[in-house]
Amino acid sequence: MSSEQPKTTGGDTVLIDRILADAREEARKIREDAESSVATRRKALEKRLAEMDVETESRVAEEREKQRARADSAISLAEGRMKLRVENRVYELARERCLAEMKKMRQTPEYKRILRDWIVEASRGLGGNAAVVRCPPEDSAAVESVLRDAQDILSSEYGMNVELQFDRKPVSGQGVVLRDPRARLSFTNTVQDRMRRYAGELRRIVYHSVIEGINGRTDHR
């Protein structure tokens, strides 16, 4: 298989924009709940300090500082856990929405173009002059309809004369899987595998688009 890394297509990145608004709202709610819990802890601390009845002012001051240090440590730990929970939930929400949006796209004209581009990308990854194309039953009609276009693009844009053969033996998931006719090499372009390959990019986009705003950060990972 070629070492050339696949590039994100327009069909991949446009899905991110659709889920960012929902991700921000989900993160905001989690953040509000957590901040409410932190505020309750702080109120309980102040009440406990105010009600302390100790023998001398020195003991009061010393005990107050101990109590405050313990409480601040617990609150800081709780805030760190809250931020991590927010980030993990937003990333998972983004992944779930991407999968759901891709299923919906099966009903749109744009979906055929996405499959065509994935076939072209996988063909270039294999690098041979022939490839067998397989897909889930739900994608069969769309895949068959774009094979000729994919061959034309490979020829006109990349100078590759590739014979694409459709194999009706189904694969699971959504998208396409290409292999050379001798079944020695394969290139998997299912939605699930693409999301695994682009997981780092997805997390980066979600982090800078959602997490930084929620946590009030300006640092960049």
Image (cartoon, rainbow, N blue to C red):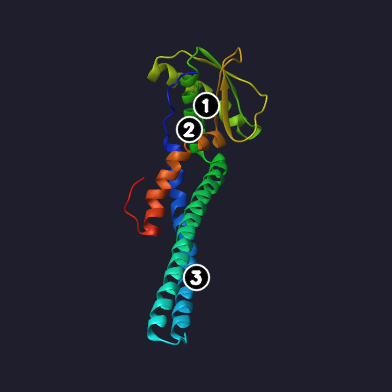
Kindly identify the amino acid type of the residue bearing the numbered disc 1: Val
Disc 3 versus disc 1: distance between alpha carbons?
A: 54 Å
The residue shown at (48%, 64%) is 29
Q: Residue 158 appears in which quarter of the rendering?
A: top left
Residue 4 location (% of width, % of height) = 42, 22
Residue 55 location (% of width, % of height) = 45, 87
When the figure is inspected, residue 28 is found, relative to residue 189, above or below; the finding is below
The residue shown at (47%, 16%) is 127
| Residue to which mark 1 is pinned | 146
Residue 74 location (% of width, % of height) = 48, 66
| Residue to which mark 3 is pinned | 37
Kindly identify the amino acid type of the residue bearing the numbered disc 3: Ser
When the figure is inspected, residue 74 is found, relative to residue 94, above or below; the finding is below
Residue 82 location (% of width, % of height) = 48, 60
Q: Residues within 10 Å of mark 2 (few under 14, many from 20)?
A: some
Q: Residues within 10 Å of mark 1 (few under 14, many from 20)?
A: some
Kindly identify the amino acid type of the residue bearing the numbered disc 2: Arg
Disc number lying in front (3 or 1) = 3
Q: Earlier in the sequence, mark 2 or mark 1?
A: 2
Q: Earlier in the sequence, mark 3 or mark 1?
A: 3
Disc 2 versus disc 1: distance between alpha carbons?
A: 8 Å
- Marks counted in the figure total 3
Disc 3 versus disc 2: distance between alpha carbons?
A: 48 Å
Dot 2 and dot 1 residues touching (CB under 8 Å) = yes
The residue shown at (43%, 14%) is 160
| Residue to which mark 2 is pinned | 113
Q: Residue 135 appears in which quarter of the rendering?
A: top right
The residue shown at (55%, 33%) is 193
